[in-house]
Image (tube, rainbow, N blue to C red):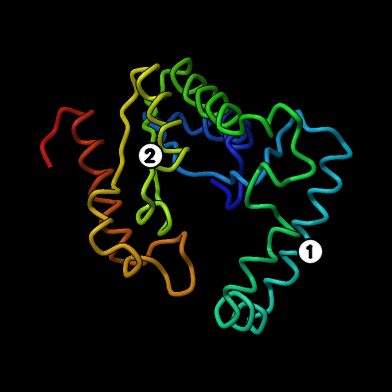
Amino acid sequence: MVNGLAYDQMNVYFRGVGLGYHPDLVIVGEANRWTQFSENSSPEFIRKFMWRVRLKNVLRRSAIYHYAIELKLKNFYERHRAKFIPVDPNQDPYFKEQQRKDPQEVFRVAIEQLCSTAVSNHVQPVIFYLPTVADLTATNPAPILRTKQVVAQKLNIPFVDPSPNLRSSAESLYLEGDPTHLNAEGNRILAEALFSAVTNLAGLRP
C-alpha cells in the first residue's frame, strides 16, 4: 500500500490495482485516520487537504527539518503538526459533521467495505492491528482496536493483535523519535504474529 492512505483510499487502490495481482490473501493493517480523504470527498475538501499534505511533504524532504523538528523538538512538533494534518478527527474543521460525532463509525464502515471487497472477489482478508507506543501504555484500549474487532467478528475474519507481545518492551521496539513505526525487533514480532495467523489459515504448522 501507499504511505498515508486512508481506509477508503485503500479500498479504491485494492479494487483498481491490488485485485489485478489475483492475491489469495490481503492484510488490512493501519491507515491514515487523521482525516477521511476519499473518492467521495468534495473538491473544496480535496483542495484544502492536499495543500496541507504538500506543505508537510516539502518540509519533510529536508533532513535538517526532520532532525531539528521531529527529533530534537518532538514536543513542539507533536503540538503543531495538527495545523498541517490534524491527528484528531474531532479537531479537523474539514471533517463532515457526522464524522465529528462518531469518527470510529466512519472507519468501521470503510474497513468493512475493504474486507467485503476482498471476500466478494474470493480473497481472504486478515485484519491486523498495529498499536502505537501510546496504545500500548494506555489504560483503555484504543478505539480503532475495538472497531477492528467488531468488523472481524461480524464478517468472521481472522484478527491479529500483536499488542501482548509488544507491551512488555513497548517504547524500545519503536524507531527513535517515532512512536508509530516499529524498529527491526518490533517488526520481527509483527512478522511472527502474521506468520502464525497465515499458516493457521493454510492449515499448516509454523
Against 35, residue 70 (above or below) is below
Q: Quadrant of residue 54?
A: bottom right
Please tell me which residue is depicted at 27% across the width and 56% down the height of the picture.
Answer: 167
- Kind of residue at badge 1: Leu
User: Which residue occupies the extreme left position in the image?
Assistant: 205
In the rendering, at what x and y percent does residue 55 appear?
79, 64
In the rendering, at what x and y percent does residue 87 appear?
63, 52
Q: Give whichever of 24, 193 is nearer the camera.
A: 193
Reading the image, the residue beneath label 2 is 128
Marks 1/2 in contact by CB < 8 Å: the verdict is no
Reading the image, the residue beneath label 1 is 55
Q: Quadrant of the C terminus?
A: top left
Q: Give whichever of 57, 130 is nearer the camera.
A: 130
In space, the residues marked 1 and 2 are separated at their CA atoms by: 31 Å
Against 136, residue 99 (above or below) is above
Q: Secondary structure at mark 2?
A: strand
Against 41, residue 79 (above or below) is below
Please tell me which residue is depicted at 36% across the width and 32% down the height of the picture.
Answer: 126
198 left or right, relative to 203: right
Q: Give whichever of 99, 48 is nearer the camera.
A: 99
Q: Quadrant of residue 146?
A: top left
Q: What count of labels does the image hold? A: 2
Please tell me which residue is depicted at 38% across the width and 39% down the height of the picture.
Answer: 128
206 left or right, relative to 168: left
Question: Is the residue marked by circle 2 packed among few (<14), some (14-19), or many (20+) residues within 10 Å?
Answer: many
Q: Secondary structure at mark 1?
A: helix
- Kind of residue at badge 2: Phe
Q: Earlier in the sequence, mark 1 or mark 2?
A: 1
